[in-house]
Image: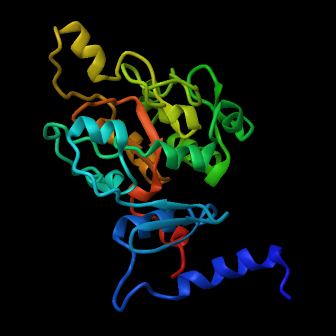
């Protein structure tokens, strides 16, 4: 008799090899998740995502949603509803409610990085931020986010010294907190986000507070800084209609992966 401790891993190995139906394949969003997080995710069906520990999540919950509902209760498919425009050519100002990356399935991030504050914090590591007054930023080591941020820092150090002023006052990395004005956890809570600081960053909520609820996209962050983050899997909040030009968030599934990091098929 085969021991029970062997049965589950054996089934997880075999299941992806049986197609659900002729010609069926996982949708593009699921394939992007598998390629971006190979250490955590194992396989996918037409509407399911399978984790390495056997957990299965539904991809599309089948519900029709408004913009606000997408923010509040996104499923995995909703995370890909708005394509993130990687590279220097992007709509500026962005169209109304064009916020690629802001629709987040919180259950996915809690599963990936930690279900609560204690679980997240046990995986945090400091990354040196050697600009202005040197400091450190704490991010998670899961998925090598700390290593990706270290690579960003190396790229930023190669930029002209004139750009250092944009980097000298980081507003932080890890912080367990809700997104301002909501009950949803910020990506900073999972140790996957970094904020720049100083007087040259722009945030729609600040502008709306000053202007009686009105805000209009604007940005001063130079493209070479954004490019350094995007090269290593971080999206930028400056490409959102609800702009947050200080904000960078590790979301490699929304970006083209470098060839060396693509999961083999």
Instruction: Residue 234: give x, y in percent of width and height.
Output: 45, 47
Q: Is residue 141 above or below residue 215?
A: below
Question: What quarter of the picture does the N terminus occupy?
Answer: bottom right
Q: Is residue 264 above or below residue 41?
A: below
Q: Provide residue 113's location: percent of width, then percent of height.
A: 61, 45
Residue at image position (40%, 61%) is: 59
> Left or right of 234: which side holds 205?
left
Q: Residue at x 65, y 31 (%)?
A: 117
Of residues 31 and 87, the one nearer the viewer is: 31
**Is residue 61 depicted above or below 9 in this figure?**
above
Q: Is residue 136 left or right of residue 167?
A: right
x, y percentage for residue 212? 16, 8
The residue closer to the viewer here, 4 or 25, is 4
Report the residue that reaches farthest toward the bottom: 22
Percent coordinates x, y for residue 228 in the rendering: 45, 47
Q: Left or right: 68 with respect to 76?
A: left
Identity of the residue drawn at 47% across and 25% down: 178
Instruction: Let me know if residue 135 appears in the view.
Output: yes
Residue 159 in sight in this render: no
Q: Is residue 175 above or below residue 19?
A: above
């Amino acid at each position: 008799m085969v021991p029970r401790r062997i049965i589950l891993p054996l089934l997880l190995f075999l299941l992806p090899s049986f197609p659900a139906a002729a010609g069926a394949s996982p949708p593009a969003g699921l394939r992007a998740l598998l390629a971006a997080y190979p250490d955590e995710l194992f396989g996918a069906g037409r509407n399911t995502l399978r984790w390495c520990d056997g957990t299965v999540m539904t991809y599309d919950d089948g519900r029709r949603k408004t913009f606000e509902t997408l923010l509040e209760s996104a499923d995995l498919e909703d995370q890909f509803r708005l394509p993130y425009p990687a590279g220097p050519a992007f709509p500026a100002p962005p169209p109304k409610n064009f916020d690629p990356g802001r629709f987040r399935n919180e259950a996915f991030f809690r599963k990936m990085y930690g279900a609560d504050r204690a679980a997240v914090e046990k995986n945090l590591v400091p990354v040196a931020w050697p600009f202005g007054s040197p400091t450190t930023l704490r991010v998670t080591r899961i998925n090598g986010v700390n290593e990706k941020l270290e690579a960003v820092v190396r790229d930023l150090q190669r930029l002209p010294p004139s750009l250092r002023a944009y980097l000298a006052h980081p507003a932080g990395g890890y912080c367990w907190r809700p997104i301002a004005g909501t009950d949803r956890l910020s990506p900073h809570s999972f140790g996957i986000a970094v904020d720049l600081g100083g007087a040259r960053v722009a945030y729609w909520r600040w502008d709306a507070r000053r202007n009686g609820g009105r805000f209009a996209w604007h940005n001063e962050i130079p493209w070479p800084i954004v490019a350094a983050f995007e090269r290593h899997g971080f999206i930028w909040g400056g490409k959102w209609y609800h702009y947050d030009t200080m904000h960078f968030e590790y979301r490699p599934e929304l970006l083209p992966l470098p060839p060396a990091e693509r999961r083999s098929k």
